[in-house]
Amino acid sequence: MTMTESAIGRLLDATRAILPLVRASADAAERERRMSAQVARAMAEAGITRMLAPRAIGGLEIDPITQLDVIEALAHADGSAGWNAQVYSSCAHVTGFLAPEVGHEIFGRNPNAIMSGTLAAPYGRALVVDDGYQVSGRWPYGSGCQNADWLAFTTGVYEGNRPRLDADGLPEQRIAIVPASSATIQDTWHVNGLLGTGSHDLEVQGVFVPAGWTFWWTDSPFHPGPLYKHRWWLLAHGAQRLGVARAAIDALYELAQVKKPTRSTILVRDRPLTQMQFAQAEALWHSARAFLWDTATRLWERADAGDRLQMKDLALARLANTNASVVAVQVAELMFSAAGGTAVYTSSPLDRLFRDAHAAAQHATASLPTYEQWGRVLLHAEPETLPRQPGPPLL
């Protein structure tokens, strides 16, 4: 067994070991609108929060397929925990683009450090100053921020009051890493799904960030592995959604064994409509999972062998990701409907799973409108010639 195989085995075993704690903590996370420090610490000690960080700085640098497995398992136990694990591991991935001495400051000094933040859009400004940037802004969706040691933010780059433009004439962006202690958490996470993520707004004002603590996705990564050639962590969004959907199927299965609908003498499992809905849900879930896992596996094998992935390859991976998100909602709705009136009570697991699936599907990374983006690339014979869009690369 290679070192990588051994690390993967340990990570999967450690993930399975904390699932009882994740399940037991889910109700409290829902009430308190945040993930507990105990669960966050367990994730960190298991290696989940640094699984995409380079081995050279204390990370696990595991393959993206293993990340899908880990996130799916956690989301099956609790959708909010799976979501935060996806955010933590995704933010840790940025250390592949930072100089090793910076990465050591983050994970070398504290192997159980947790990184969170908002990588999606440039809500803040990075004002160019000597030797770095002065960063200010307010970012929504700071998932798991209460347990973070470091935060990563996407910013627009400014020189004075003007945005700095890149070589293509588009506004330049950078991701800046700051200590979590430099940010103020604004209590904004009053929502109806994924309550336990604690995805409050985060605000920083005039924080100096050295140039070496910033980067952009088009920069050459400091670490040479294939994990840092693409933003593989984006595909974990689909894994989180499918973990929730699988939990909905399992919850309906358990209910169907014992519940008799109102004015009925048969169990839910014996109703033809329920049988049809359950079969549809299983088919949808297995198809979406196979599309995502198989596409990710095939592309990872090519990247690991040194192949250069084309835009259509990347668009197909993102399509599989979006499909997983959309299908998860369909599955949750089928199982919620099949459960009847039982599902509307907060005591029913299907209530939370229904809300979590819909909340997750709103994220811009894999929401319904992204079908248009992936179709745009797939429909063109030479998508590389399409005008460059502002923002990060496709994958």
Image: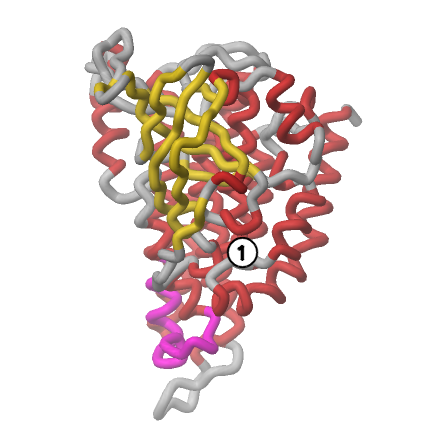
Query: Residue at 64% across / 26% down in the picture?
Result: 105
Above or below 391: residue 345: below
Query: Residue at 64% across / 47% down in the picture?
Result: 43
Observer-nearest of 366 and 190: 190
Residue 9 percent coordinates (x, y): 73, 38
Q: What amino acid does circle 1 point to?
A: His
Query: Residue at 45% across / 11% down in the picture?
Result: 308
Observer-nearest of 281 and 16: 16
The residue indicated by pointer 1 is 76
Inspect this view and state whether residue 312 appears.
Answer: no
Decide whether the magenta segment is chiefly helix, strand or loop: helix
Please rate how many residues cluster around mark 1, counting C-alpha atoms within 10 Å: few if below 14, some from 14 to 19, many from 20: many
Q: Is residue 182 left or right of residue 319?
A: right
Query: Residue at 42% across / 13% down in the picture?
Result: 130
Residue 326 percent coordinates (x, y): 32, 48
Residue 341 in magenta stretch: yes
Chain part drawn in magenta: 331-349
Inspect this view and state whether residue 123 appears.
Answer: yes
Observer-nearest of 42 and 322: 42
Please identify the quarter of the rendering in which residue 140 is found.
top left
Above or below 271: residue 86: above
Please identify the quarter of the rendering in which residue 174 is found.
top left
Quadrant (top left, top right, bottom left, bottom right) of the N terminus? top right
Residue 307 percent coordinates (x, y): 49, 11
Quadrant (top left, top right, bottom left, bottom right) of the C terminus? top left
